[in-house]
Amino acid sequence: MDSYVTSVVSRLQMLYTSDHSSVVSMNLFVALLCTCIVIGHLLEENRWMNESITALIIGVCTGVVILLISGGRSSRLLVFSEDLFFIYLLPPIIFNAGFQVKKKQFFRNFITIMLYGAVGTLICCCVISVGATLAFKKMDIGSLDVGDYLGIFVTSTFFVVSILSFSQSLVLLCCYFPAIGAIFAATDSVCTLQVLNQDETPLLYSLVFGEGVVNDATSVVLFNAIQSFDLSHISPRIAGQFVGSFLYLFFTSTMLGVFTGLLTAYIIKKLYFGRHSTDREVALMMLMAYLSYMLAEVQFFLAFL
């Protein structure tokens, strides 16, 4: 009986410690976010520093200070849940990016953006996959496990580490070169967009922004399609199924987003939300956008971007 009570108490203490760490971590995250916003505003006219570089430097310095002061004991404060990011933080980022873009410029250059974002990403994925395969075969490197993968790619982005953590086991290295190619084909244009001015260079800004969005969406669709197949033994049938899966994910995700947007516009126009209640109109628009995101990500396993 005493051992059972002791076990229950220890579990409650661990749960309390975990919850406390989560609260402290979130408070630290919000404080750093506020600091980055203020400093980014102060450096808005600076030629050598921008908001994204400032956020990166502040995050790295904060992590180093916490580890040095605590001697590594408070490292759990630095653990950031990818579920928290993908479910709660990423949707408003995507919504804000799409809401602020100038639609006329985007659709006027739609073909160019699709060539850069979709076709360019496919070419980049193929080049990286084939190059990595040849390089690792030439170096005579055999199968690796998850730890080896994270050791190789830990210097890349948070997106890479988060996606690789979903893989439960990696048996043959050559099977996952296409996934690596899909991950590294995703380029981040945040720093570039921070330097550009949308009013001074509307064409260049539209091309870079559109390419970044389509590039990320194509990479996510590619990765989801690759996860569904065993590419260690490629045959014409598997290749055809892979292409079909890619096209299905791409167009189904697009149609889901378009349908949700049209349905929201119809409801708002039909019920005169804007005339009677602007707060409900904004709330409905944001909630419907979040609903389409969650349907694509959780319910139908499509590409959320």
Image: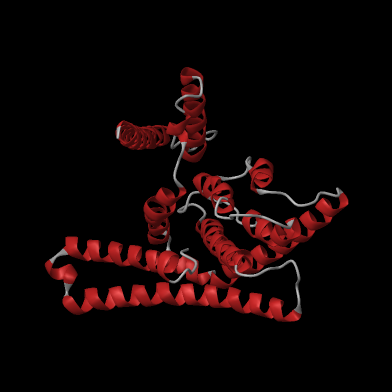
Numbered label tally: 0
Residue 171 picture quarter: bottom right
Q: Nearer the viewer, residue 226 or 168?
A: 168
Residue 158 picture quarter: top right
Q: Nearer the viewer, residue 134 or 140?
A: 140
The N terminus appears in which quarter of the rendering? top left
Residue 46 visible? The answer is no
Viewed as shown, does residue 154 lie left or right of 173?
A: left
Q: Can you name the residue that lies furthest to the left here?
A: 276
Viewed as shown, does residue 116 lie left or right of 268?
A: right
Residue 67 visible? The answer is yes
Q: Is residue 270 above or below residue 276?
A: below
Viewed as shown, does residue 148 lie left or right of 209?
A: right
The residue at the point 46 percent across, 64 percent down is 304
Q: Is residue 127 above or below residue 85?
A: below
Q: Is residue 212 above or below residue 113?
A: above
Q: Position of residue 271 (x, y in %)?
A: 17, 77
Residue 257 picture quarter: bottom left
How has the structure been colored for display?
A: secondary structure
The residue at the point 65 percent across, 60 percent down is 179
Q: Nearer the viewer, residue 81 or 110?
A: 81
Q: Position of residue 8 (x, y in %)?
A: 31, 37
The residue at the point 52 percent across, 56 percent down is 205
Viewed as shown, does residue 173 lie left or right of 105?
A: right
Q: Is residue 191 above or below residue 93?
A: above
Q: Can you name the residue that lies furthest to the front here?
A: 1
Q: Position of residue 133 (x, y in %)?
A: 79, 57
Q: Position of residue 188 (x, y in %)?
A: 56, 51
